[in-house]
Image: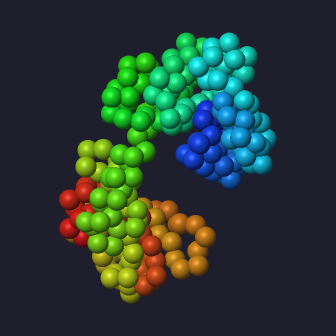
Amino acid sequence: MAKKYEIVVIGLGRLGFRLAQTLVELGHKAVGIDISTNRIKRAQEVLSQVYVADATDKTAMQQLGMADYSHIVVSIGSSMEASILATLTLKELGAREVWVKALSEQHEAILHKLGADHVLFPESMVAQQLAHRLVIPGLTNYLGMGRSIALQERDAKQWAGKTLRELDFTNRHNILVVAIKGKGDADFTFIPGADTQINEDDKLVIIGKEKDLSAL
């Protein structure tokens, strides 16, 4: 059985609310915290547990038991100061894993120094995704993995009628096909066999160096 998490999302703006909503859809429990009563009212329709609270208030965060949760996401989008103070408060209370949305590169550097376990810079991530989709034909998704390694979802039309063994992506192009999804399939099939035949409407998930993926 897949492990279920109970995750706190602090800041229920566009990103935070969508994150909490997606966590619930995935079967996890999301606890929402925001200083805005209007945002809390909206979140009540999706989340079973929500609180109007100031994340920079150490007493309030302690009373809500922030140290008891495995993951806390700080998605305060309008104030760098509030985000920094909230992160500092959570780490002082002993929160185990704190993920924080950064508003700028300077903000990102400060959050790392405060001990944030993971720092997210959504604007940078979106820009990176867009740049790769613009310059790599056939690319439908991009996930940077560091050291010039990327995971891509690609249309398979150009390889229709051939098997993975015949295409021999690993030896010919230095990339690996890690998943495949046929037309009408709800989910991807991971680690497809070498004799899997590619159909025109299939989607392939491949991994490799960016230069090799671009040349494919």
* Residue drawn at the location 63% of the way across and 45% of the way down: 17
Q: Nearer the viewer, residue 201 or 36?
A: 36
**In which image quadrant can residue 70 be found?**
top right
In this rendering, does residue 176 appear at all?
no
* Residue drawn at the location 60% of the way across and 49% of the way down: 18
Q: Nearer the viewer, residue 57 or 8?
A: 57
Image: 47 above or below 8: below
Tally of marks: 0
Q: Position of residue 84 (x, y in %)?
A: 47, 22
| Quarter of the picture holding the C terminus | bottom left
**In which image quadrant can residue 195 be found?**
bottom left
Q: Position of residue 112 (x, y in %)?
A: 39, 24
Q: Nearer the viewer, residue 33 or 141?
A: 33
Image: 101 above or below 113: below
Is 187 left, or right, of 29 in this rendering? left
Q: Position of residue 67 (x, y in %)?
A: 64, 19
Q: Position of residue 212 (x, y in %)?
A: 22, 62
Q: Nearer the viewer, residue 125 or 23?
A: 125
**In which image quadrant can residue 108 be found?**
top left
Is 96 left, or right, of 53 in this rendering? left
In this rendering, does residue 210 appear at all?
yes
